[in-house]
């Protein structure tokens, strides 16, 4: 599974890299700090999952999400943010986010979701005789 990380905090990027980098079946294809570069990377790298912050320089995470989903990419999005209010949750989900987590309360849930996605991906790729 190809995962692209996008957050303006190096600390968060490092924690995500540490959490997911050693998972079997996970390839971190990029680690970016602004929305403009993230949008370009999504279009060229076609990751399976983007873990993205809402508040970033250039395009916001929600703007990136909106642009990508308009083009019907199959890329899944996980919004991971300090702005975890119902307002932003509803907005992200309306734009097509698959997951929405608070950096404060839900950070550890990220690896569980990735594990479930990997399991689903592996189950779908089984060859049945």
Image (spheres, rainbow, N blue to C red):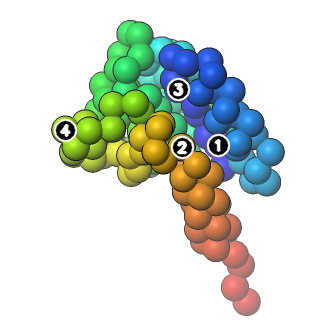
Above or below, 69 against 6 in this view is: below
How crowded pointer 3 is (Cα within 10 Å; few <14, some 14-19, many 20+) is rated as: many
Tell me where residue 12 sits by quadrant.
top right
Query: Mark 3 or mark 2, which has the lower sequence index?
Result: 3
How crowded pointer 1 is (Cα within 10 Å; few <14, some 14-19, many 20+) is rated as: some
Q: Secondary structure at mark 4?
A: helix
Dot 3 and dot 1 residues touching (CB under 8 Å): no
List x then y, in percent, for residue 100.
38, 46
Q: Say which residue label 1 marks.
A: 2
Q: Residue 31 shows which numbered tag?
A: none
Q: Say which residue label 4 marks.
A: 87
Q: Say which residue label 3 marks.
A: 6
Dot 4 and dot 1 residues touching (CB under 8 Å): no
Q: Secondary structure at mark 1?
A: strand
Above or below, 23 against 102 in this view is: below
Query: Mark 4 or mark 2, which has the lower sequence index?
Result: 4
Above or below, 45 against 129 in this view is: above
Tell me where residue 71 sits by quadrant.
top left
Q: Say which residue label 2 marks.
A: 107
Dot 4 and dot 2 residues touching (CB under 8 Å): no
């Amino acid at each position: 599974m190809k995962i692209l990380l996008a957050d303006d905090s190096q600390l968060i990027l490092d924690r995500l890299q540490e959490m997911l980098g050693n998972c079997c079946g996970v390839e971190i294809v990029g680690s970016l700090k602004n929305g403009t570069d993230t949008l370009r990377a999504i279009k060229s790298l076609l990751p399976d999952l983007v873990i993205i912050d809402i508040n970033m320089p250039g395009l916001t995470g929600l703007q990136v999400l909106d642009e990508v989903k308009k083009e019907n990419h199959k890329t899944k999005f996980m919004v991971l943010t300090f702005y975890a209010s119902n307002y932003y949750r509803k907005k992200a989900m309306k734009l097509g986010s698959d997951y929405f987590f608070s950096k404060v309360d839900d950070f550890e849930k990220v690896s569980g979701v990735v594990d479930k996605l990997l399991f689903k991906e592996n189950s779908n790729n089984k060859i049945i005789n």
